[in-house]
Amino acid sequence: MQNIQTFFDFDAVSGTSAELATEEEISVVRDEFDRLEAAALRNRSQTVATLSTISSIVAQSSSPPFSFIDPHTTGLMAIGHAIDSLRLLDIETSDLTVRGLEARVAADLSRQFVALAATGVIAEIPDSEDVATWGKNVVDKLLCRKEHGSQIDSLFDMENNRFYEFSHALLEEYTRSGAIYVRPTAACLTLYLGTLTQGIGDIQTALAAVIQRQIARGEYHAALQTAHEHQRITRQHGEKIRTLRRKILANAGRYSWGSSVLPEIQIAQRDVEDAISADTALEELLDSSMDTLPKEKRPLAQRVLLVIKSCRNAYRELQTLAMELPRLYSSCIASQGFASSHIPLPSMHNDVFIPLFNEVFEPKALLAACDIVNAVFATPRPALLHDVIAVTELLLKPVSSSEMIDTSPDGDEMLDEEDLALSIFDAITIDKARKTIALMADAGGTRLSDIMKALEPEGFTEESVAAAIMISAAWAHNRNHDGRYAVSRTYRRFASQVCSGDDYLVELKGAENDQR
Amino acid sequence: MISVDAVDMAAEIIEYGLSPRKGQSSRRVLQLVAAYLANTDGTRTAAQTMAKRFGLSITSVTEEGVVLSKEPEHDSIFMPKRDDVVKEPGTEARLLRGICNAAILACAYQRQQALYSDSVQTVTSEEVYEFLVEAAAKMTLENGEAPASLKGITEAARIVERMKADSFSEKGGKPRKQTLRGQIDIAFKYFTDHGLMLKDSEDAGGTYKTLPELRVRLQTEGAQEIAYAVLSAVKASSVDAAMKEAMNG
C-alpha cells in the first residue's frame, strides 16, 4: 500500500536530495516514473491502434484506377470534415450526416481523379457511381463497421499487467431528431490533434504561450495557424469533459467519489480555468497591440482575435459544465438508486445469449426466458378504437396523391402478405396473374384452385389474389376472361392461405363446347 | 398550481411517447423536454399523473425521444397483448422470436460498454444468421454426436439446426417465413415497427441501426430483467436435469 503514491507526492519526493533519499523513497520515485512511462506507452499504443484504421484503407485499393488514390489524405480529409462539422460550443453535436460525409469523400476522390487524368496516369475519370461507392467504403472503414474489420482491439496495460478492450473507430454514428449523424470519436480527436503524452490542459497552455510569442514578433500568419490548432484542441478538451459527464450519467455508482470522480473533476476545472486565463491574456495582448499595428496587419490580427474569443467563449461553457459535475454526480447517485449503481449492466452476449443458447436444455424453461425477452420490447401502443363507422369513413376519405404512394422504407414481401386488404396491385402483379392464367388455360383448361396452388407456394400471394378476383369478376360479368377464355362455375369451393371462394373452370373458347 | 398549458404539454409528451415515429420538430421536442425537466408550471407532475392513470410510467424524456413503459402491477390499455407481439400462436413462434431477439441484441451490443454509450450500433440480418448457425454448429461439434441426431444439444440449438436451411421466395428473393432467415427478418421488423431500430439499407440481408429508445429500454430495466430470466431458466433447467438423472439412477 505504501507504494501507491499520488502525482503530487512524487513532486515532493523528487525534491529531496539523492543523498538523503532512503531506499524506500527511491523505489517510490521509480514506481512513479514507471507509472508515467506506462501511461505514455498506453497513449501511444492507443494512437497506433487508431491509426491502423487509416492505413487499412489501402487494402481496399485493389483495382485501378482506385489503386492510384492516396488513401491517407482521403482518410484524413474525411476525418477533417467530421471534426469541422462539430459545433465549437456544443462539441458533441455535428451537423454532418453519414450520407453527407460519403458525398464529401466522393468529391475529394473526384479531385484526385481529375489530377490523375490531367497527368495522364489514368485514361478517363471513373463513373460518379463508382466514385460514390468507393467513398462509401472509406466512410464504412472509418466507422469500423463490422464487415470492415473489428472495432475493438485487445491492448496490454503495462501498469496493471492486464489486457483491456480498446475501441478504435475513428468516427461514430449517433441519432438526433430521428436522423443519423456522424461525429469523430474521442480516440479520433486525440489522434487527429496529435496528442501523445501531454495532458490537454498543458498543451493548451503551451499553445497560448506560442501564440503570445508569435504576436510579440508580429508573425500573425503563424499566430492564426496556432490559434486554429488551439481551437481544435478546445473541441477535444470539450469532448474529454463531456466524456467524464457521460461516464457519471451512465452509472455514477461505479465510480467512487474520492478516488475517481473528484480528482478528474478537479483536473478538468483547473485546466479550464488555466485556458480561460490564457485566452483572456491573449485577448488583452491583441487588443492593446491592435492600435499600434501597421494597417495591413490589422485584418489578420482581428482574425486571430476572433478565434481566441471563440475559444474563450467555449471554455466559459465548459467551465459551467465542469462546475456542475459534482452536483450531477450526487443527483445521479440519488436517482440511480442502489440497484443500478452497484450492479453493472449485464452483457447481452455473455450473460444473455450464451447461457440462453448453451445451457437451457429444458423447453419449458427456455420458453419462460424467451417470453421475458420478447416482452421487454413490447412498447406501449395507442389502444385500437373498435368503431366500424369511423374506420369506414377513414378508408373512404379521399387521399392526396403524395399519401397514395407507399413511401414505407420496408415495403417488403411479408408486409404485403399481411396487409393484403389495403394494398393496390401494381401492373407487374396483374401481368403475372394474367400470364399464369393464360399459360395454364392454354394447356388444356384449368381450375382457379389449381392456379392458386401454382402461385401461392412460390410467394406470389398478391398475384394469386389478383387471379381470383379476375376470374370471379369475369364469371360475374360475361363468363369471359381476356376475350379468349371461357369461365364456368364448378359449384365447388377453394380455400388458400389468404382467400377462399367459388372455384371456376377456365378454358380456351371453343374448348368448352367440345367437351360438352 | 398546474396550468392548462402544462397539461397540454404533458399530454403531448405522452402522445409523443406512444407514437415515436410520428416525428416532432426538434424545436418543439426541446421545449417539451425543457418543460418536463424543469417541471415548468407542473408539466412533469401532470405528465406523470396522467401516465400513471393510464397504467404507464415515463422512463425517460430527452431530446432523443420519450420512452414509456408499463407501470408495474397495473394494467394498461396501451400495452400490447401477447398476440400483438407474436402474431403466430404457439410455443414454437415464441421460442423462435426469443432466440432471434437475443441473437440480435448480442450482435448489436457485442461489447458490454456499448450499452452505456449513446453511439449508434449497426447489425445486419446476415450477421445474426451466421451468429446463430455458428453457435449451433459449435454446440453440435462439442457434443460429439452425429450432427443429424441432435442428441444432447439445447432446445435453442435444435431449433436453429432445424430451420437454418435456406429457402427464398421466387418473387423478390426474400427468405421464406418458415426459415431461420425469415424469422430473423420478422424479429427485425418488430424492432423497426416499434421505433427501436431503423432499417438503413438492404445490404447483407438488411442493415439495421439501433435507436436511442432500445438502449434506454435496456439500460433502465430491460437488460437486468432479461439476464435474470435467463439465469433462472438455466437454474430451472439444471434442477430438472438433476431430478431426471436421480430418477433414472
Image (cartoon, coloured by chain):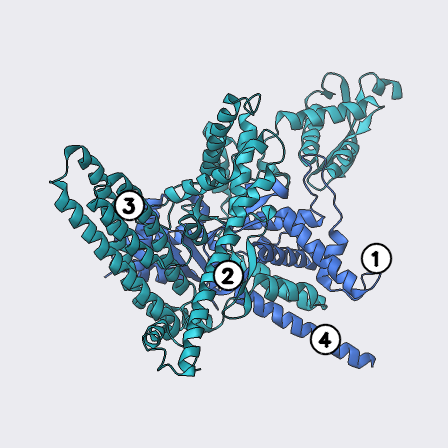
Determine which of the numbered discs, if any, sits on residue B113 in the image. 2
- Considering every residue shown, the one lying at the far right of the view is A515
Q: Are marks 4 and 1 on the same chain?
A: yes
Q: Colour of chain B?
A: blue
What secondary structure is found at the residue carrying circle 3? helix
Q: Which residue is mark 4?
A: B240
Mark 4 → mark 1, Cα distance in angstroms: 25 Å
Question: Does residue A407 appear to the left or right of A237 in the view shown?
Answer: right
- Considering every residue shown, the one lying at the far left of the view is A291
Q: Which residue is mark 1?
A: B148
Q: Amino acid at mark 4?
A: Asp
Which chain is the one coloured cyan?
A
Q: Please identify the quadrant where the N terminus of chain B is shown.
A: bottom left
Q: Amino acid at mark 1?
A: Ala
Q: Residue B219, how many percent across, how many down?
A: 48, 62
Q: Residue A326, how many percent across, how many down?
A: 31, 68
Mark 2 → mark 1, Cα distance in angstroms: 38 Å
Which of the pair A199/A239 is nearer the observer? A199
Q: Chain of mark 1?
A: B
Q: Residues within 10 Å of mark 1 (few under 14, many from 20)?
A: few
**Nearer to us: label 3 or label 2:** 3
Q: Residue B94, how many percent across, how many down?
A: 65, 58
